[in-house]
Image (cartoon, rainbow, N blue to C red):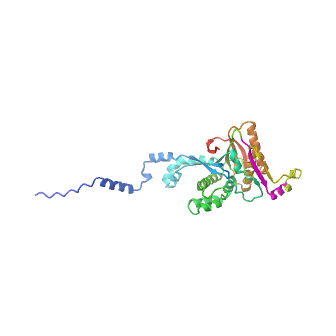
Amino acid sequence: MFAPQPSRPSPPKPGSAVAITTNEINEQPFRFLDLPKEIRLMVYEELRPVTSRDKIPLRSDGHHLTLVNTVIPGISIQATCRQIHSEASHFLTPVKRRIIASPPTLAIHASHLISLINPHDCIEIVHNKILTEALIYCFSSPSSARAIARWRNGSISTAKLRPKLNLQHVVAEDDEPSLRAIARFILRAKTYTASNPDTMYSQPPLTLAITVPGTFPTISVTTTTSRLKALSYRLFDRDAIVRPRTPRTQTGLADLRWVLCRFAFSTAFVSRLWGGVAFSVRVRGSVEGRREHRVVAAVMRGVWDAGCQGEGLLYYGGGAVGEEDDDEV
């Protein structure tokens, strides 16, 4: 007699076996190190630097300052493990060195500079009502990097970060994208200055690229001088004794040279006050010959008026090379 044959299992329902197999595969974690080394190296090669241009609105309608920031997306992959860090360093370390060695750049159109000028001349200890002045404070303050680190890991809220960075007067409460862009730029600038770049000036210079149009229309400006500041001019300025006394409030038309001179004055003065950073002013546009000489003279006059001659806190660095669409009107 033949032994009874075991009964065969009934065939699975259509699609059920495939569904179970797929779910089991999806539940298994994917390990990057399971890929062949050649493929991993191809992934590292694709981690290329990306330049972002974040437009930060200024106090005047339509005016903005552009923060140019170059980063490597996905660079945190190096923190995964030692093997990945060793493999990726061959590709990423030279790129990081080039990024760190290049000065961070701020870009602005010449017609927007009026929003970076404080029309009220007074004696102040803290300068935080102008974006560039607030940035200079953040660059020099050792607590700004710690505040940004605590904000990124969730220890403090966005509302608390603004006053810690002295930005409550220049960044709106609901403008978190601008706050994030400024925080990234501050860390980028601090990394650059901490690298001790080889420079002939007293402080590591950031690049300030100004786009100058072919024709610059005059701007109506009203300036005021506080009583205490006016008194200080009379007491400490030798020439003020022989000059006729001017009214503390004046309204007039400002041309490009006045705007550049006033901006250079305030920026150099605050840079001397806080220290830690300098600015290299570079110009985009058709600025040649006598017109370039006027630009240089206006910048140097503002630096001289701020009492910063020879300190290298703000100087003319020549023409700017790069894209111009990031600071268009």
Seen as rendered, the residue at the extreme left is: 1
Q: Is residue 262 above or below residue 168?
A: above
Q: Is residue 199 left or right of residue 26?
A: right
Residue stretch rendered in magenta on the structure: 216-233
x then y, percent, for residue 232: 83, 57
Residue 146 visible in the shown view = no
Where residue 60 appears, x then y in whole percent?
Answer: 68, 51
Q: Residue at x 74, y 38 (%)?
A: 291
Quarter of the image that includes the N terminus:
bottom left
Residue 309 in the image, given as x and y percentages of width and height: 78, 48
- How many numbered marks appear? 0
Q: Is residue 125 magenta?
A: no
Q: Indicate yes or no whether the magenta region holds residue 229.
A: yes
Residue that appears at 63% across and 51% down: 56
- Is residue 157 visible in the rendered image? The answer is yes
| Extreme residue in the top direction | 289
Most foreground residue, 245 or 104: 245
Q: Position of residue 224 (x, y in %)?
A: 78, 54
Instruction: Please indicate whether residue 12 sits to the left or right of residue 122 in the image.
Output: left
Observer-nearest of 77 and 317: 317
Task: Spot the residue most to the right.
Answer: 242
| Residue at x-position 60% and y-position 57% | 174
